[in-house]
Amino acid sequence: MLRFLMRGLLSPSAIIVINVLILIPLILATIDVSHSVLTNPDLKEPIDIIEDMGVIMIGWGVALEERGEMRRIFGIVDPARETWQAHVDHICHHVGIGQLVFGLMIEICLSIVRLPARIIDTKDFDEHVVGVSIAFMIIGAYILLRHIYALVMAMLRPHAVAGVASK
């Protein structure tokens, strides 16, 4: 039962769905916090929203990065499709690292803003640091879009992918 569930969750189709479920709030949050930063001097809510999106990016990045290992742990190995699965694992690993790194960069930026002024005084450029965090969210969204495209192409042309990966 667990193996069946994990096979479904680790499938490219499920990963695409999860990517979309993360991408939509990531885009909406980017638009919302960009507007808030430009129109409202209070950064508390935008920082909270950005932080939440950073945590989601980090968590999803770790999950994507370890797709191949999770397949092995749960015994989801199909020798007939292993070259193709390894290619998908490779794509997910790289995207996972991107999500993880940019999510962490968001957290670092927000931590800098939240440090007390006696440690680092950012009051004159808080909005700029938050703006950098927003840029990292945009990069994360772009990476997810490219990942969706790469997975769709891998699903549409599994033999082409397997042929290239086995050379």
Image (cartoon, helix red, strand yellow):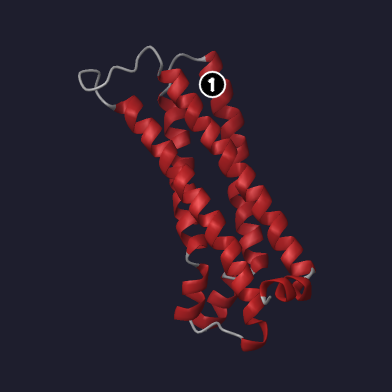
On screen, residue 157 versus residue 41, left or right, reads right
**Is 31 or 90 nearer to us in this picture?**
90
Pick out the residue farthest to the front.
Answer: 167
Residue pictured at 48% horizontal, 43% vertical: 102
| Residue 63: percent from left, percent from top | 48, 61
| Residue 113: percent from left, percent from top | 35, 25
| Residue 8: percent from left, percent from top | 60, 74
Pick out the residue farthest to the left.
Answer: 118
Residue pictured at 66% horizontal, 82% vertical: 81
Residue pictured at 67% horizontal, 87% vertical: 80
On screen, residue 29 versus residue 70, left or right, reads right
Rendered view: 128 above or below 151: above
Give the quadrant of residue 120: top left
Residue pictured at 51% horizontal, 20% vertical: 37
Amino acid bearing label 1: Ser
- Circle 1 residue: 36
On screen, residue 51 versus residue 21, left or right, reads left
Rendered view: 166 above or below 42: below
- What element does badge 1 sit on? helix
- How many marks do you count on the picture? 1
Rendered view: 135 above or below 54: above
| Residue 110: percent from left, percent from top | 38, 31
Give the quadrant of residue 137: top right
**Is 140 or 34 nearer to us in this picture?**
140
In which quadrant is the C terminus drawn? bottom right
Rendered view: 74 above or below 22: below
**Is 12 or 48 nearer to us in this picture?**
12
Q: Say few, some or many: other residues with alpha carbon within 10 Å of mark 1 (under 14 / 14 to 19 / 20 or more).
A: some
